[in-house]
Amino acid sequence: MSLGVYLHLPFCLSRCRYCAFYSGEPPSRSGELVEFLVIEMGLRVKEGTGPVQTVYLGGGTPSLLTPEQVRHLLRAVDRTWGLDRAGEVTLEVNPADRLPLESFRNAGATRVSVGVQSLDDAVLEELGRRHTAAQARKTLAAAVAAGFASVNADLLLGLPDTTPGELALWVEELVDLGAGHLSLYSLELHPGTELSAAAAQGRFRPSAEALEEAQFRAVVRAAEACGLQGYEVSNFALPGHVCRHNSATWRGEAYLGLGPGAHSFLPGAGPWGTRRWNEPGLDPYLTALGRGKPPPGGGEELTREQALLERLFLSLRCRAAFAPRELATRFGLDPAGTVAAFQALVPKGLFEVLPGGRLRPTWEALRRADGLALGLHERLLGAGPGGASAAGAGAAPGAA
Ligand code: SF4
């Protein structure tokens, strides 16, 4: 079982018009947060067993840290749990900033994730992004030149003025520039954001579902034509460029989230694992740690039912093959009924059958993962002691 560490750096120089993340703390306070993140590591030392295989500096805008601050944090991770020398260390960067990329790499980052979002300046402006398409291109090329082992580009889907053809060309261009990994996000209109207010007043028109689906299909085709494999519903990588941090999370391995607003999953705490979170807000975080107490937040020990649902959600989002029998053993389900419940979805084109009875979700399944997971969950738990006793009845859970 691996251990990942997520460090949340909630600093941004301005607010993007669609952003509902916890961010926007003043970057002038980054020095304070870095010191208190190290204190939090000391308080949480017993929550994880090292060495740490992956560190993810996310935000916010972690690239507002100095390389020295990044080095300081990574040394603290190493002192606390040990940091695997071959570990993956990802730093999210904003192309609007002057980025000392080579110094970040020398400080220990092995991978950068560039918030490209779009290569259309008018769209970037409408989104309230601080960068231009030219800056995004320049940052990708500079990251490759700085020698990072892997470079990711984030792209947004669901933008009404972006055609599927444009997205396909952008994917080719991003890969040509050296991105070995693509992450897709859907534009969502969250209450309280500027863009959702603009939509309510008719000043912004969200894209139709059919357009977003066409955008997604165009990206998948272009990415595959460039040699990237889709390994999760929103993530594509050249061989050797899969994001180890996120993959471990989707496999249900342990990660410790540190910093205000960060979430953790501790699979060894309780029979089915425990989720823990720190509340957003820099001041309460610093105040509690300053008194030697854990930051405000909460935790929840998962029940068997919750753990099974989470496993289904995550397994159906990823293209990795899994064995229904192993799932049955792990969750105390009837093996034959569990296998039958999954097999019923094969003729519907939702799984490929691999040798040994392992199943690999198809793209169709990935796109419908949430509904399928809910249907399977109900079916697997719904009948008889231990569940799944009637799962072979033939109806396709969630697939209608
Ligand atoms: S850079 Fe990211 S976290 Fe910051 S405001 Fe924009 S979307 Fe939100």
Image (cartoon, grey):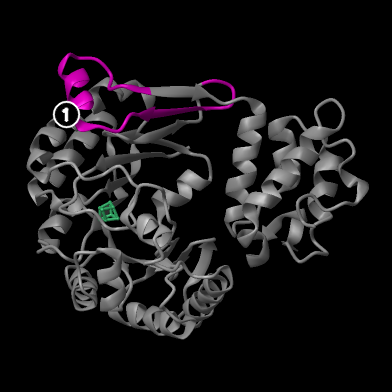
Residue at point 49% right, 76% down?
Answer: 219
Does dot 1 land on a helix, a strand or a loop?
Answer: helix
Residue 22: which quarter of the image? top left
Left or right of 202 in this view: 383: right
Image position, residue 11 (x, y; %): 19, 46
Residue 343 lies, with reference to residue 338, above or below; the image says below
Left or right of 17 in this view: 333: right
Residue at point 40% right, 57% down?
Answer: 243
Residue 25 lies, with reference to residue 303, above or below; the image says below
Residue at point 23% right, 36% down?
Answer: 78
Q: Which residue is mark 1?
A: 36
Q: Report if residue 68 is visible in the image.
A: yes
* Span shown in magenta: 270-297
Residue at point 10% right, 33% down?
Answer: 32
For ligand 1, give the image quadrant. bottom left
Check mark 1 vs ligand 1: CB closer than 8 Å? yes or no: no
Left or right of 355 in this view: 88: left
Outermost residue, right direction? 393
Residue 5 lies, with reference to residue 193, above or below; the image says above
Image position, residue 360 (x, y; %): 67, 59
Query: Closer to the camera, 106 or 256?
Result: 256
Q: Quadrant of the C terminus?
A: bottom right
> Magenta span has 296?
yes
Q: Report if residue 149 is visible in the image.
A: no
Which amino acid type corresponds to the residue marked 1 in the rendered image? Phe
Image position, residue 152 (x, y; %): 33, 65
Query: Closer to the camera, 294 or 73?
Result: 294
Image position, residue 155 (x, y; %): 38, 68
